[in-house]
Structures are given as C-alpha cells and as structure tokens.
Image (spheres, grey):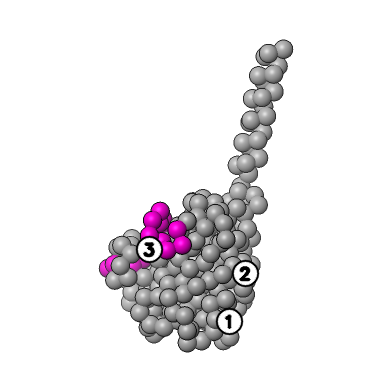
Amino acid sequence: MKMLIFIGVFLGIFVSNSLAQKMVPIQIDLPKAMFVGTPTNMTIDKLEKPLGKPRPPFLAPEGTKNVALHKKVTSTDDMPIIGEVDYITDGDKNGDEGYFVELGPFTQNITIDLEKEYNIYALVLWHFHKQPRVYFDVIVQLSNDKDFKKDVKTIFNNDLDNSSKQGKGTDWHYVETAEGKLIDAKGEKARYVRLYSKGNNSNDLNHYIEVAVYGK
C-alpha cells in the first residue's frame, strides 16, 4: 500500500511539473509595415544586421499575456511635444501620425506600473516604425521599487558610453521595424518597467508607439 501511495504522489508531482513547464509561443499582434527593404547609409557603431525574415516565435509558459495593456504610464517629460503617454499601453501599434507620443530631447524615460508583481518573460517595444530609425541609449529595467532605487534588473542596455548614467551597456543598436524589438526578460519578477532612450539617428527627440510586457 505504501508503495502505491509513493508512486501516486510521484506521478502527481511529475504531471504537475510537466503542466507548469508547458511552453507556447506568445501572441504578438503586429501592425502594418510602413517601409520595406534594408536601410542604407547608417554608420552606427554595433548595429545589428536585419534578419531579412520574420522573427522566430518566442516561447513562454502557457497563459502568458500582455500585462501592460491599459496600465498607467508616467514619464520624465510630463508635457509631450506630440501625443499622450497613454498611447504607450493602449494596444495600438499603428505607425502613422497620431499614434505615437513624442518626448523632448536628451535622455528621457517612461515607467509602466503593472499594478502587481508578475513573472516577466518578454517585452516588445515599438519606438517609431514609419521610417527606419535607430534609437540611442535604449535601456530597459525592471523593479518592484517604483523609484528604481533598489532591486533594479537591467534586461537591455545599448548605451555604449554610459551617457545616460545607468551603466555602460553591451547590447547592440537595432533598426526599428513593424515587428518591434523583442527583449527576453527570462521570467524576472517585477511590478514596474522603466525604459530609457536618448534621441535617434534622425533627430534628438524620443518616441514611443507601444510597449507590450508579456508576463504571468
């Protein structure tokens, strides 16, 4: 009898762990592409080459979804030049005029309050995809501290000269496209998401269309 009970408990734990580990592709609704072809004449240090094909699916535990949708966004620029910061989590990734917020020059950041702690598996970011652009000092941080003074985890940083004062990054620059930039968050736990940028190769301003945070 004891042996049967042991086997039953073992099988129960095995099945439970198997279900917990079930990984499926996250669902990312992509906007209409605004340009085609490979950008040229971009002389930028450490610039990723375009894949030239759709991005491979990103796997995360079943039930993972965009937990940033319609959540509150704050910014270091409280008077955007164009648009509102609410656009960043409204779910609309259209690249046309009227769908992005334009923040002032120099280093700016936005913070999304997810309202509770989640395991975060990926983040997809759209700055601007009407034209091929490269944004500088793109830094993405997670924390449970709303002021980001402690327990800060940096999951992406391409500030190669530490000009935005968040530490020197090692990630590469990339060209904005309708696919957005997907960043692997590796299941880190956090309530707040902060994103930095410092202008782009076209002008000194900072733009956001949408930020989707995939968590559970």
Q: Which residue is mark 3?
A: 157
Q: Is residue 170 left or right of residue 89?
A: left
- Determine whether 147 is above or below 80 in the image: above
Residue, x 29% and y 71% (percent of image)? 163
Q: Earlier in the sequence, mark 3 or mark 1?
A: 1
Q: Earlier in the sequence, mark 3 or mark 2?
A: 2
Residue 11: image x %, image y %?
67, 27
Q: Is residue 48 left or right of residue 23?
A: left
Q: Is residue 210 left or right of residue 16?
A: left
Q: Is residue 149 magenta?
A: yes
* Residue furthest out toward the left: 161
Disc 3, disc 1: CB below 8 Å? no
Q: Which residues are magenta?
A: 145-162
Amino acid type, label 3: Asn
- Determine whether 69 is above or below 13 in the image: below
Q: Which residue is mark 2?
A: 70
Is 187 in front, or is 126?
A: 187
Residue, x 36% and y 66% (percent of image)? 158
Residue, x 63% and y 58% (percent of image)? 65
SS for dot 3? strand
Q: Nearer the viewer, mark 3 or mark 2?
A: 2
- Visible residue check, residue 151: yes
Residue 77: image x %, image y %?
44, 79
Q: Earlier in the sequence, mark 1 or mark 2?
A: 2
Amino acid type, label 2: His
- Visible residue check, residue 121: no
Quarter of the image with the N terminus in it:
top right
Residue, x 31% and y 62% (percent of image)? 167
Q: Which residue is mark 1?
A: 99
Is 195 in front, or is 179?
A: 195
